[in-house]
Image (cartoon, rainbow, N blue to C red):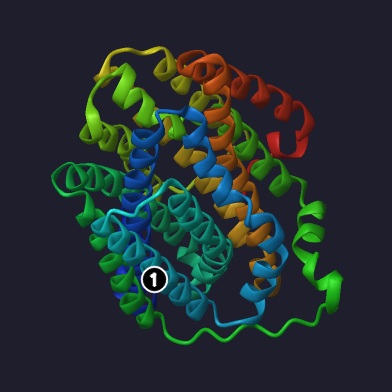
Amino acid sequence: MALREFISTRRGLELFAIPAFAGYWTGRFGGMMAMQMQTLAISWIVYDLTGDPFALGLIGLVQFAPTLPLILFAGQVADRVDRRLILMTCQIVQGACAALLLVLKVMGGLDLWVLYLVMALIGSVRAFEMPAGSALLPNLVPTEVRKNALALNSIAGQIAVTLGPATGGLVYALDPEMVFALAALLNLFAVVRLRLVGPQPPMRSGDAKGLRSLLAGFAYIRTRKDILGAITLDMVAVLLGGVVALLPIYAKDILMVGPVGLGILRCSPAVGGILMGVWLAGHTIDRRAGPLLFIAVAAFGVFTLVFALSTNFWLSVVMLALAGAADEVSVVIRQTLVQLTTPDDVRGRVSSVNSMFIGASNQLGQFTSGTTAALMGTVPAAAAGAIASIVAVGICAHVFERLRRTDRI
């Protein structure tokens, strides 16, 4: 390993010696683990109750629906309130949701409408959590290692997406109630760890008040065509080509591997993401960022297409892992653009707009894939979505020329 690469890797690992970063990283990891376990259990219960792909798609819709009316307010809060307190409050609410589901599951009253209501509440909470978390991270580490911190933070998410579904699927197969109990405990753990971050008073902004202040995130992104292109590209590709909502169908009806197999399928993209994230933690993307972004998103579509057509479990696992690795490149480039090139006093509002795009791709994408699967069939819908995402990359490359030509971030 070259000396520069060795120093970069060491520098990334040494970030954990900073108490604020260590508390942030472990706290966010615990919260994401809880979210992944809980979401897997709910998706399995919903499909087990209904056998309907459209019902699975509704999980994404009810999470995304609260985001739209809250997006402007959530960004404003992230720039005006201690971001650490926002994160801690969000974890407390999510832990209460897990505890409620545990009680109802034990009592035998876990109806479909209750599951949708809880997911809508979690979607509302995450509308505040995502911009606050994204805006807070750059302030916790020295400027020269912020890219390493972003890569390590992405790894935390990927590890959670790996262990969460796998653990959730295994625990659910043994004892369904235990999934919600563990999720609640992990939310409590997150609150305790986030206390290490310490108070984070907001930076006072001199911008206008009222509606103009609320719209500052949109106004900033409008002036940054590279950021607009990056978040649009990611949104369109995942919105069209995402298959997460369909994984319970693949696990139960196509690959026939049960809840444990579902956990493996759900964590496979994150395994690829972790491996890519570890590499990126020591090899930051310094050149040809724009072309790499388009190549990564196109590769995501190709790997998703192969998965859609596969009837072999392990081939499906490998394709999802490769798609996750490609997506990790896209995530790191987009996060670097949004979090490291945006002034701190508007970073919460810009991150809020970014989180809306992420929610549109992930959660609204679940609804779209569930709806098309109900109309076309699961395999045709997944394959058509993957092909559409590849086509979308070509269109975005033409529309966002500045992003395509971006070299250094």
Judge whether 357 appears above or below 298 on screen: below
Question: Which picture quadrant has residue 106?
Answer: bottom left
Query: Would residue 295 be visible to someone looking at this image?
Result: no
Residue displayed at 31% across by 39% down? 267
Q: Give percent across and percent down for residue 77.
A: 65, 75
Question: Which picture quadrant has residue 336?
Answer: bottom right
Query: Would residue 256 be visible to someone looking at this image?
Result: yes
Mark 1 surroundings within 10 Å by alpha-carbon count, few (fewer than 14), some (14 through 19), many (20 or more): many
Three-letter residue code for mark 1: Tyr
**SS for dot 1:** helix
Judge whether 246 appears above or below 88 on screen: above
89 or 332, nearer to the observer: 89
Task: Give left or right: position of 210 versus 301.
Answer: right
Judge whether 201 appears above or below 168 on screen: below
Total numbered badges shown on the rendered structure: 1
Residue displayed at 50% across by 43% down? 59
**Residue at the extreme left:** 174
Residue receiving disc 1:
24
For the N terminus, the quadrant is: top left
Q: Give percent across and percent down for residue 119.
A: 48, 54
Task: Give left or right: position of 348 versus 35.
Answer: right
Residue displayed at 59% across by 40% down? 364
Q: Give percent across and percent down for residue 128.
A: 57, 67
40 or 396, nearer to the observer: 40
Residue displayed at 22% across by 55% down? 177
Q: Give percent across and percent down for residue 45.
A: 34, 41
